[in-house]
Amino acid sequence: MKPRVVLFALLVSLLQVALHASGLTWVIPNLALLFVVWYAPKLEYVPMTFLIILMSAILETGSVLPTGLMMLGLFLVMLASKLVFREGRDANKWSFQLALVVAATIIFNIVVYASLPAGILASQLGQMGLRIALEVLYNSGILLLIVGLSDRRQPTHPHFRLPQ
């Protein structure tokens, strides 16, 4: 595993904690989830598990969620990602990644809301769907931006290529 991937994982988790600590009360994109979906097909199980544990240790410090929920969620997303891309046979299919981000965002938020006390959950029930939909839009837009920026190759017709 390259050191820049570890550094990037640290930066993503620190940015996620900083966004939550900044006082924003509405919807914040789940950058750790995007990191796992993006890198899970590219890395093996052991390095990816190490990165998830590292990121979760940082994310748990700034979270009010039950301990271990973030780690469990990211680990399950990694396993789902491995399964999806093993079956899809292509780690560069943005449609698989987009579907995985949408499904993981919805399920992750439902689990987070289910972990809240009943009184808080009842008062937030009306806004829950809107918040989840907005986070799905944020996460999907960021993923599509990452996919667009990472795809540097532009297919051209052989007629337009320079002679070799």
Image (spheres, grey):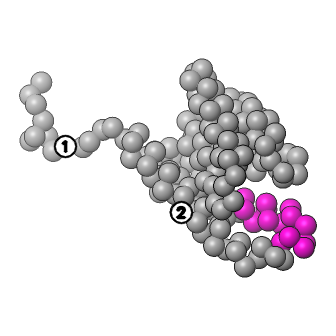
- The part of the image, by quadrant, that contains residue 121 is bottom right
Q: Residue at x 65, y 68 (%)?
A: 131
Q: Is residue 148 visible?
A: yes
Quarter occupied by the N terminus: top right
Q: Is residue 104 visible?
A: no
Q: Secondary structure beneath disc 1?
A: loop
Label of residue 72 in the image: none
For the residues labelled 1 and 2, the Cα–Cα distance comes to 31 Å
Disc 1: which residue: 156
**Residues drawn in magenta:** 108-121
Mark 1 is on which residue type? Thr
Does 19 appear in magenta?
A: no
161, above or below 122, in the image = above
110, above or below 76, in the image = below
Q: Is residue 62 left or right of residue 136?
A: right
Residue 158 image point, x, y percent: 14, 40
